[in-house]
Amino acid sequence: MFVELKDVYYRYQAGEEDILRGVNLGIAKGEFVALVGHTGSGKSTLVQTINGLLRPSSGQVLIEGREIREWESPIMVRKKVGLVFQYPEHQLFEETVFKDIAFGPKNLGWSEKEITEKVKQAMDFVQLDYEELKDRSPFGLSGGQKRRAAIAGVLAMEPELLILDEPIAGLDPRGRRKLLDRINWLNEEQGITVLLISHRMEDAARRAKKLFVMNQGQIVLQGTPQEIFEQRDELYEIGLEIPPLNEVLWQLRKCGYPVRTDIFTIEDVEEEILRHWRGFRCSKI
């Protein structure tokens, strides 16, 4: 297992309630997984323990079988596990876009030539114009550009696990789709393990092969998107909604039609509805 958490607890201060409560999960190398849950469920805290930014109050966090506390330095953990924060303003800090993206590679001791090449590659990947933006202040960028610059700063270190905390928040539908397509390419073509945090069940299901569902600091459900969406009532109980397309299928099932509810692409849903179209009549929808 590439990443493994064993009975992890975390609290910010002694005497406070635990934010994480006995979390156990495993992520295999090369997987694309998603962590979903409502605001305050512990998602961001959890991924910061994987990245080494937070040390568990108890339990173990292992990267490639090695306890994270045993690594030589934090920078080596960050090279292995890259974390893109939910708010890019929490990650950007340098005078220029170039210096910000180059910060990680520079601390890894790479040559100036290597650093420049990695910055160019990372900016090109997130579709930021190198010549136009390299000398600009990262704080003068648009919201979408800041988010992409933060992602580029992590990608420049060539992590083996890329953690993205709500990376598409604030983006328009086209921007969300393009960014998720690029992340999917990293996973499928480059073999980078991806952990996506999202409150949008639809985006998580379309990309990830496995979902972890959090509630009150615990992993309460895990499985394939199909398996998770079959547990609609449990999701509603913890404040999560299944994608609208799946809700349509659930409502049709309530009317007595034997439609599947474990599909989530519009093409599959359309085909499933058409298979049962003859005689569709339901006053409950």
Image (tube, rainbow, N blue to C red):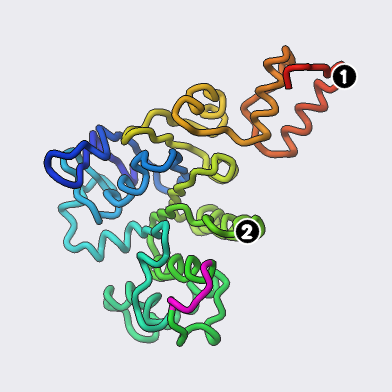
The answer to whether residue 30 is visible is no
Q: x%, y% of residue 218?
A: 33, 33
Q: Which residue is mark 1?
A: 278
Q: Is residue 49 above or below residue 106?
A: above
For the residue pair 231 and 285, the one nearer the viewer reads as 285
For the magenta stretch, what is the residue range?
138-143
Quarter assignment of residue 61: top left
Compared with 219, 97 (above or below) is below
- Indicate whether 42 appears above or below 142: above
Residue beneath the point at 47% across and 84% down: 134
Quarter assignment of residue 170 = bottom right
Which quadrant of the rendered structure holds the C terminus?
top right
Residue 120, given in percent of the width and then of the height, sits at 49, 79
Per the image, label 1 sits on a secondary structure element best described as loop
Label placed on residue 31: none
Determine which residue is flagged by label 2: 172
Q: Position of residue 102 (x, y in %)?
A: 37, 78
Element under disc 2: loop
Marks 2 and 1: which is nearer the front?
2
Q: Amino acid at mark 2?
A: Asp
Q: Is residue 140 magenta?
A: yes
Question: Relative to residue 265, is residue 64 drawn left or right?
Answer: left
Q: Is residue 69 left or right of residue 264?
A: left
Extreme residue toward the right, this view: 278
Query: Overall secondary structure of the magenta stretch?
Result: helix
Residue at horizontal 62%, vertical 27%? 262
Name the residue at 27% across, 78% down: 109
55 displayed left or right of 3: left
Q: Local crowd at mark 2 within 10 Å, few (<14), some, or many (≥20)? A: few
The answer to if 73 sits in the magenta stretch is no
